[in-house]
Image (spheres, helix red, strand yellow):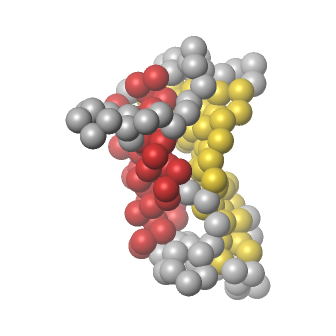
Amino acid sequence: MSTGAVERAWCVVVPHHVSGARVARHRLAAELAEAVSPAALADLVAVLAELVGNAVRHADPLPGGVVRVAWRLRPTPEGAQVQLRVTDGGAAGTPRIRPADAAAADGRGLHIVSGLASRWGVERDGLGQSVWADFDPVPDRPGLVAAS
């Protein structure tokens, strides 16, 4: 880890619309391109797209018809840890992994999140719900690197 590395966080508000995932992916990629490896960035972008897509498909928007997207970069001696967080207005059910039918057109999003992230979860508060995913550095695989 570089001695000048500091924790950084970003928050963007995107439309509660399929275009919101594109906006979020591009912002994340632009902000973290220099802080993480290309392989790690691809994983982060894929998971963020799934989380925003799920918020748009399955949940209500926040006031103003939006979804809040945030990420945090934490330098550690092993590399950088990243947390993604997508907050929406909530849904009737809690996001959960469901069995994926090979013939189904959807239903694999949280399988992707679970497979790529170190861990993920859901938090509810008075505003709505946040689905988060943490990515820890993986020393034996090209992945997250410390920000400078």
Taking the image as shown, residue 4 lies to the left or right of residue 64, namely right
- The residue depicted at 71 percent of the width and 27 percent of the height is 124
Which is nearer the eye, 45 or 119?
119
Vertically, is 113 above or below 79? above
Which is nearer the eye, 75 or 104?
104
Quarter of the view holding residue 8 = bottom right
Vertically, is 71 above or below 96? below
Q: Position of residue 66 (x, y in %)?
A: 51, 25
Which is nearer the eye, 140 or 128?
140
Q: Position of residue 22 (x, y in %)?
A: 36, 43
Q: Quick one: quadrant of the N terminus?
A: bottom right
- The residue depicted at 56 percent of the width and 30 percent of the height is 95
Taking the image as shown, residue 122 lies to the left or right of residue 91, namely right
- The residue depicted at 27 percent of the width and 33 percent of the height is 104
Q: Position of residue 68 (x, y in %)?
A: 57, 34
Q: Position of residue 24 (x, y in %)?
A: 45, 45
How many marks do you count on the picture? 0
Is residue 52 visible to us here? no
